[in-house]
Image (spheres, coloured by chain):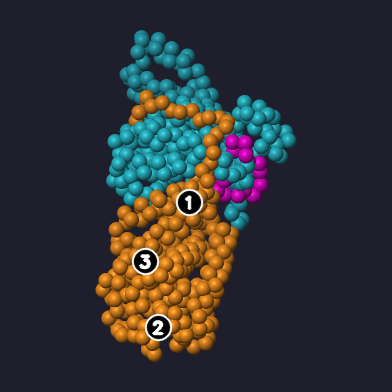
Chain colours: A cyan, B orange
């Protein structure tokens, strides 16, 4: 483990272990715009190598937080260390270890895929080979095509190529699959999983809860500038502990539904009652969406 | 999507050297020129500017500058060369930077390990290149169709080069300053047009500077265009024409000083005021 504590002064109580394992470490982050508080005492820890999803409604403070972590906005107070350094003062070396995938792009239409990826590689001390990156994002056949001729999904993959060509340790992915069709989204997920396997830490902001569930090791729900829950997507907000909903069809009484803490026991009873198969059996826990809506108060 | 590709693991420590600011500037200029020359409409407009101006002035002003035996062509070729340089440097760079903000180029660039100075120098280098092409077209057209006499001494060509380079650097730094403050491409063109137009009238571009009243002359003398024109006149007009200049000489030293002062001042202001993150962004 590298001795990260040397480069993050002001962390009196932070142990070497914690600082070394955290790609992102945030304590009590506050950001105001005039009278409005965008981020209100936010704490966040993203471990090296994990894919971490930041979920939350519009205006919850996701973008502001991400921009502070990227070094593009100044905070009003709180401690922030990204890859062991304060983004507000970190230099070019730090920036060369970070990749940012933008939400949209209309700036490189006249260039070919190969030209723009090679150009971006030129900013970094040790870039990935451009051809390898283009292949990785599935644009090999498009290397000589102008960006203006790419489809929306191909353009997003190009954005990812530009975000990873510098071989970043930490990648910021902002709403990466907005506007994708389901097939393109699944392909994109494969790409993100491949990056994770290669050891890249990924901070993903997304509106798609399914995406967080598919990709993230852990997810945080942010609401009104604070983190209201952090956990594995399947455990988030106590999803796993919530009552299960068991549904079946009774031959006489029609569709039935029961909420229970012991679904296995109920299913066994039903199985005995119907002599084997339970007609139209379903067992479900609250979806991530249910939990999300509860946490962000949008169901009230 | 190819899952089989081998991802190279980053070297954890002992990372490679960061590219120098100068190399990044050259890379920026290269990619910007490539993008620029593929936008056919912009290219056609930039390079037809000197030709159109020559056609207009060549058909209006015939003969010699009054009280001299200097053909008018020599005079307004110098003026068009200077305003063309200002157009490429000042308007071109200001609108270019503002458009970079509109189309999110700046947003993309701010996430890269690149100092601002490389971005600025990239703009300057690409403006120098297109300015040079524009100047070459102007001189070719003037010589072929309007009987322009090109300078014959190496010293005069040298003067042309330094006045052009320094003048363009001055205009480009001012373009960077203004373009960096503009909200988008449209507001940038609105902001840069008035100074461009007004300075053309008070800098002795198309009629002799000495005909202007002392107040306008004084105002014109504060700004770079007057000095760029004067410098380029010293390339295309005979030394006897110096008597027509307010100071009675070409004032090369003063030209260099004024342009340098504007460049340094412009650069200092733009480095202080330029933000990767526009204040108009959410």
SS at badge 3:
helix
Measuring from the top left, give residue A97's x and y in whole percent.
53, 37
| Earlier-in-chain disc, 1 versus 3 | 1
Choose between B248 and B152: the one closer to the eye.
B152
Measuring from the top left, give residue B74's x and y in whole percent.
36, 78
Q: What's the CA distance linking mark 2 and mark 3?
A: 20 Å
The verdict on a common chain for dots 2 and 3 is: yes
**What segment is highlighted magenta in the picture?**
A66-85
Residue receiving disc 2: B207
Q: Residue drawn at (54%, 56%), measured in percent from left and top?
A: B275
| Earlier-in-chain disc, 1 versus 2 | 1
Residue receiving disc 1: B25
Choose between A39 and A109: the one closer to the eye.
A109
B54 sits left or right of B176 in the view: left
Q: Which mark is residue A273?
A: none
Location of residue B155 (image quadrant):
bottom left
Q: Residues within 10 Å of mark 3 (few under 14, many from 20)?
A: many
Residue receiving disc 3: B135
Q: What's the CA distance linking mark 1 and mark 3?
A: 23 Å
């Amino acid at each position: 483990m590298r001795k990260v504590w040397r480069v993050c002064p002001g962390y009196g109580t932070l142990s070497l272990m914690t600082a070394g394992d955290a790609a992102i470490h945030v304590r009590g982050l506050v950001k105001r715009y005039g009278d409005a508080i965008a981020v209100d005492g936010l704490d966040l820890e993203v471990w090296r190598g994990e894919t971490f999803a930041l979920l939350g409604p519009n205006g919850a403070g996701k973008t502001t937080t991400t921009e502070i972590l990227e070094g593009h906005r100044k905070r009003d107070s709180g401690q922030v260390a990204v890859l062991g350094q304060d983004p507000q003062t970190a230099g070019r070396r730090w920036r060369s270890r970070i990749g940012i995938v933008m939400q949209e792009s209309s700036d490189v239409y006249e260039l070919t895929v190969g030209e723009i990826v090679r150009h971006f590689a030129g900013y970094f001390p040790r870039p990935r080979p451009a051809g390898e990156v283009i292949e990785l994002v599935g644009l090999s056949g498009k290397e000589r095509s102008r960006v203006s001729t790419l489809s929306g999904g191909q353009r997003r993959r190009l954005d990812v190529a530009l975000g990873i060509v510098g071989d970043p340790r930490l990648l910021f992915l902002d709403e990466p699959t907005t506007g994708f069709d389901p097939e393109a989204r699944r392909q994109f997920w494969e790409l993100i999983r491949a990056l994770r396997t290669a050891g890249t830490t990924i901070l993903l902001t997304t509106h798609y809860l399914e995406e967080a569930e598919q990709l993230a090791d852990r997810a945080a729900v942010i609401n009104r500038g604070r983190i209201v829950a952090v956990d594995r997507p399947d455990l988030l907000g106590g999803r796993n502990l919530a009552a299960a909903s068991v549904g079946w069809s009774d031959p006489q009484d029609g569709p039935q539904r029961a909420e229970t803490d012991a679904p296995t026991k109920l299913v066994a009873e039903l199985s005995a009652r119907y002599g084997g198969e339970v007609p139209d059996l379903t067992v479900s826990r609250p979806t991530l969406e249910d939990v999300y809506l509860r946490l962000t108060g949008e169901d009230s | 999507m190819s899952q089989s590709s081998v991802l190279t693991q980053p070297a954890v420590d002992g990372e490679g050297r960061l590219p120098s600011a100068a190399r990044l500037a050259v890379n920026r200029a290269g990619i910007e020129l490539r993008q620029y020359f593929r936008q056919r409409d912009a290219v056609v407009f930039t390079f037809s500017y000197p030709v159109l101006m020559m056609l207009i002035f060549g058909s209006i002003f015939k003969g010699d500058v009054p009280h001299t035996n200097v053909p008018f062509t020599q005079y307004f070729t110098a003026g068009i060369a200077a305003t063309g340089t200002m157009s490429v440097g000042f308007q071109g760079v200001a609108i270019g930077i503002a458009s970079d903000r509109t189309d999110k180029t700046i947003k993309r660039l701010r996430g890269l390990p690149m100092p601002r100075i490389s971005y600025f120098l990239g703009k300057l280098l690409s403006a120098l290149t297109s300015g040079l092409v524009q100047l070459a077209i102007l001189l070719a057209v003037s010589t072929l169709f309007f009987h322009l006499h090109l300078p014959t001494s190496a010293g005069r060509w040298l003067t042309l080069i330094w006045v052009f380079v320094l003048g363009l650097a001055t205009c480009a730094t001012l373009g960077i300053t203004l373009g960096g403050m503009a909200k988008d491409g449209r507001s940038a063109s609105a902001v840069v047009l008035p100074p461009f137009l007004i300075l053309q009238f008070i800098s002795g571009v198309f009629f002799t500077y000495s005909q202007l009243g002392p107040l306008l002359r004084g105002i014109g003398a504060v700004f770079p265009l007057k000095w760029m024109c004067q410098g380029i006149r010293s390339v295309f007009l005979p030394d006897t024409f110096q008597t027509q200049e307010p100071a009675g000489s070409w004032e090369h030293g003063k030209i260099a000083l004024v342009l340098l002062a504007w460049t340094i001042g412009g650069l200092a202001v733009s480095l202080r005021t330029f933000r990767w993150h526009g204040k108009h962004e959410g």
